[in-house]
Each structure stands twice: as structure tokens, then as C-alpha cells.
Image: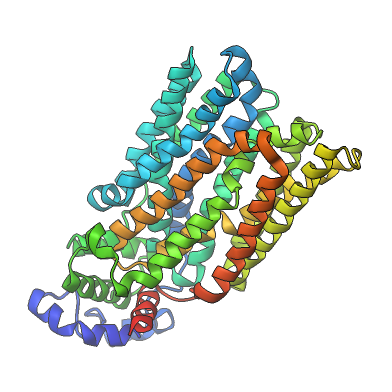
Amino acid sequence: MEKGLLRKSLSIRERKFPNEEAFLETGLSRKSPREITKKAQNDDGECRVTATVFFSTFVAVSGSFCTGCGAGFSSGAQSGITKDLSLSVAEYSMFGSILTLGGLIGAIFSGKIADVLGRKRTMLFCEAFCVTGWLAVALAQDALWLDCGRLLLGIGVGLFSYVIPVYIAEIAPKHVRGSFVFANQLMQNCGIALFFIIGNFLPWRLLAIVGFVPCVLHVFCLFFIPESPRWLAKKGRDKECRSALQRLRGSEVDISREANTIRDTIEMSEVDGESRMSELFQRRYAYPLLIGVGLMFLQQLSGSSGVTYYASSLFNKGGFPSAIGTSVIATIMVPKAMLGTIIVDKLGRRTLLMASCAAMGLSALLLSVSYGFESFGILPDLTPIFTCIGVLGHIVAFAMGMGGLPWIIMAEIFPMNVKVSAGTLVTVTNWLFGWIITYTFNFMLEWNASGMFFIFSMVSAFSIVFIYFLVPETKGRSLEEIQALFSNSVQ
């Protein structure tokens, strides 16, 4: 397929680079036959997973750790904030959900900012909001400052949610791309787990300072990673593209074929031109757009954000000690997410997604039954146990698949010429419905907890059907091969 791409775009390259030695017709650099033979086993260099790729991925997903800290903060700090600042249920619901509202604002501009500034500088830009937001929360004396800080943190998190998976997908070799992007979810769970544990012991202001520290460390580490080669190629910075790619694949690897394939794909997407949001709704983009938007829509309507943000309230309502419950979640969710990181490139995206949705649906159904028993006074001794298993199962199942895989697929399925507009729309969908769920969650919990979780279980059941019939397997395919797959499906 890659050779076909080279031949298909040859005339374009000849017009644009008639004397350019960086990109040759054969897809190989001007090296001696001995050098070429020596590197034959590494052909395009994509099988290499170097220390630079590992380090760059770790630095990128450190931003997801900051995201997890923000998500876990509202659960551990709820009792302290409501007591110290005398907040009502409505006011604390606004505080908890305003992170997702800020995420929505950040998501609206995420694609464009990442396209203009580049992936690396966008992550630096994100941290400016996160650092300011954590300081505002830590120093807040009333609900207004508290909400402003949380909103700023949300804007940074919203930008992170787009740029991190896109950056990792663009630098990682295809055979480990799923695992590396899934590390995004793993680090997010690490942040949530940390705050679930220490939130039981630390006052909420000190907890906010703890959230501030990894943001500062992340800023420092970002200066030591390369920019995305695909973004550099899109901007016509070919020498820098090859330099970044060489750094990622290793100094002794011949990266000519991979560099040429990236250049070919960029050139073919440039024939169509950069698509505006209004041009996104064309037949040729309908299939990937349906998958991207649909997965984000179903991810949030499964109730995942509400369960994570207000885990303490769920335990208390079911009569289970919240401190014990959140500590158990924190202990288990990181190993489960780690397991997902290992098996995502072995089982594939579809299998793991459907298994995750099935477990989430069963957990939500168990919570529906638990709260139903609690409201009618039936089996009072079993209600706390059912509540613990249900909350624990829902969060762990989400961490294993539905939490991270939609972001992996989003980063894989869109071609470069629509990645800005399509990625923005998909990210906005996620944060919009995330805000709706997190804002209404406490009200729905007081209104009818059993009915709410029954709806969530039905959404998870529908998600399995959606994934089975519409979501293709992208495991083991390069980004260029995936784009060719969707092009062929339209034809």
C-alpha cells in the first residue's frame, strides 16, 4: 500500500520538489548498497521503539496525569469545600461540572491551536491554563474564584484531550501505537487514583497544590522532546521532519521510506485542501465522522464522568464508607488500565471496546438494582456491597477500554486535511456531553438513582451494537493504511 501511495503521488512530488534529494522516487536515501542491505531488516524503521519514543510518549501523557488529578479532585475535596465555603448541592455541582465546561471551551479551539502552534507548543500552552487554575483553586476564598480556577483548569484539560493522543499517534510505530496512546488513559487513571487516596487525608487546599506540582514538572520536560514529524511535514518543514523522525527511530535507521510515505499522504491531502468545518459533512468523511462522534457521545452517556467525579457521593448514598471505597478504586484501577495498555495491540480495539462496554453495562445495572433496593428498604445488608461492586466495576471497566480507546481511534481515522476540523468536532462532542452529565448527575442521583443507572446500562448495551457493526479494527495498520481503508469504503 505504501508503494502505491508513492507511485500515486509521484507526479505531485516531481512538480513540487523537482531537484529535492530528500525525497527520491525509489523511497530510499542516497546511501551505498552496503548501507541499504545493512538496514534491510528495519526496512522503513517503523518497527523500532527507541528510548526517544518512550520518553516522548511519557512526557506527553504526563499531561494526562494532570487531567486525572483534576478529575479526581472533586470527589476527594467535596466534603471539605462544601463545609469551608458553605456551598449548596447546586453550587458544588457547578464547581464539579465546570471542569467539563472549560474542557468544552478548550476543545472548540484545540484542533486549530494544535495545527498553528504544533503539538509540542500546544502542550506548553495547555499548562499555562492548568498552572493558573490550580493556584486559583488553592487560594480561593469564595465560590467565584473556585469556579474560575476550575474553569481555567478545564480549558487546559480540553486542549490536552485532543493534542496528546494526536501527538502520540503521530510519533509511535504502528505496531505499538495503540498501547502508547492508551498510556494516555493509564496516566489519567494514575492521577485519579492518587487524588482518590490522598484526598482522604489532605485538606482540599493542599490537594490543589499537589495538583500544581506535576504541571510545573511537565512544562520543564516538554523542552526535551521532538515535534511531531507529520505536523512538520504538513507545514512544509521537510528537513525538520526528517530530523525529528530520525531522532525518534534511531540514528542508524534508514527513515527514507517512512518519510516519503508521510510526504505522499500530506501531498494527497493537500490536493483536497484544508477542509473547513462546513465542508466536513461530505460523503467521503461521513464514515469516520460517525465513528468518532458516535464513540465520544456514547462514552459520556454511559455516565462515566459522573461516576468518576462523584464516586464519594455514590458510596455514601449506598451506605458504603467513601474513604474505603475510593481507596479500593485507586488500588485497582491503575493495574487494570495498565493491563489495557498491554493488551490493546494484542486483542485489538473492537474486542476491548465491546468487553469494556459490557462490563460497564452490567455494573450500571447492578447499581440500578442496588439503589432500587435501597429506596424500597429491601435487603439493606446487601445494598452497600452491591454499591461498592457496581461503582468499582464501572470505573475499572471504563479505564480498561471505553475511557482511552475512543481517543486512540479519533487520532487514527482522520486524514491530515480534516484532522483539525474533525478532531475539534469529536473533542467538543465529548466535552459537551461530559458537561451535561456531570452537571445533572447529582440532581438525577437525588431524583431517581436507580432509573439513572438503568439508562446508563442501556446506553452501554447500545454501544456494543454500535461498535460491532460500525467500528473497524485499526490494530497493526499505519495511519496511511487506515486512511486508505476509509477511502476505499467510500468508493
Look at the image and tell me in which quarter the C terminus lies.
Answer: bottom left
Q: Nearer the viewer, residue 114 or 397?
A: 397
Residue 173 horizontal/vertical position (percent)? 44, 68
Residue 70 in the image: above or below residue 201: below
Query: What's the colour scheme?
Result: rainbow
Residue 75 in the image: above or below residue 399: above
**Residue at the image point whose x is 59% and y is 38% from the top:** 441
Residue 296 in the image: above or below residue 64: below
Q: Quadrant of residue 371?
A: top right
Q: Quadrant of residue 230?
A: bottom left
Residue 259 in the image: above or below residue 80: below
**Residue at the image point whose x is 66% and y is 65% from the top:** 355
Residue 191 horizontal/vertical position (percent)? 58, 40
Q: Quadrant of residue 172?
A: bottom left
Look at the image and tell me in which quarter the N terminus lies.
Answer: bottom left
Residue 209 horizontal/vertical position (percent)? 52, 24
Q: Could you tell whether 25 is left or right of 105 in the image?
A: left
Q: Could you tell whether 4 is left or right of 381 in the image?
A: left
**Residue at the image point whose x is 24% and y is 70% from the top:** 266
Q: Nearer the viewer, residue 59 or 85?
A: 85
Residue 250 horizontal/vertical position (percent)? 39, 65
